[in-house]
Image (cartoon, rainbow, N blue to C red):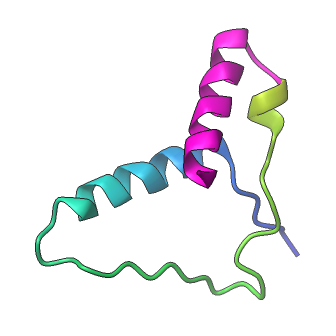
Amino acid sequence: MRLIMFCFQMLNKLVDILEKLSKDNECNTVVITTNAPNFCYGVDFTDLTHGTIDKRRQFAVHLAAAVK
């Protein structure tokens, strides 16, 4: 079984989609579902621990904003 981990790319895609939906006057509810037994097994912190300092900082800022 492949575990679903929340990563930086997923965070960016989700933020983009939610920003677009927030401007849609016909959308007033968003439901996020999955076909897997669990929605998410956790956060993939690889982007926070690998790569350039700027990439790690960017991931940390996005992650903090997402959980705020």
Residue 17, compared with residue 60, is above or below; it is below
Which residue corresponds to the image point at 64% horizontal and 41% vertical from the top-left? 64
Q: Position of residue 13 (x, y in %)?
A: 46, 50
Q: Position of residue 38 (x, y in %)?
A: 77, 82
Residue 61 shown in magenta: yes
Prevailing secondary structure of the magenta residues: helix
Examine the image and state in which quarter residue 24 appears: bottom left
Which residue corresponds to the image point at 76% horizontal and 66% vertical from the top-left? 4
Which residue corresponds to the image point at 36% horizontal and 59% vertical from the top-left? 18
Examine the image and state in which quarter residue 63 appears: top right
- Please report the bounds of the magenta region as a residue range: 50-68
State which quarter of the image contains the N terminus. bottom right
Residue nearer the viewer, 66 or 4: 66
Residue 25, compared with residue 17, is above or below; it is below
The extreme right residue here reads: 1
Q: Is residue 18 left or right of residue 54?
A: left
Residue 22, compared with residue 32, is above or below; it is above
Q: Position of residue 37 (x, y in %)?
A: 77, 88
Residue nearer the viewer, 22 or 55: 22
Residue 21, compared with residue 8, is above or below; it is below
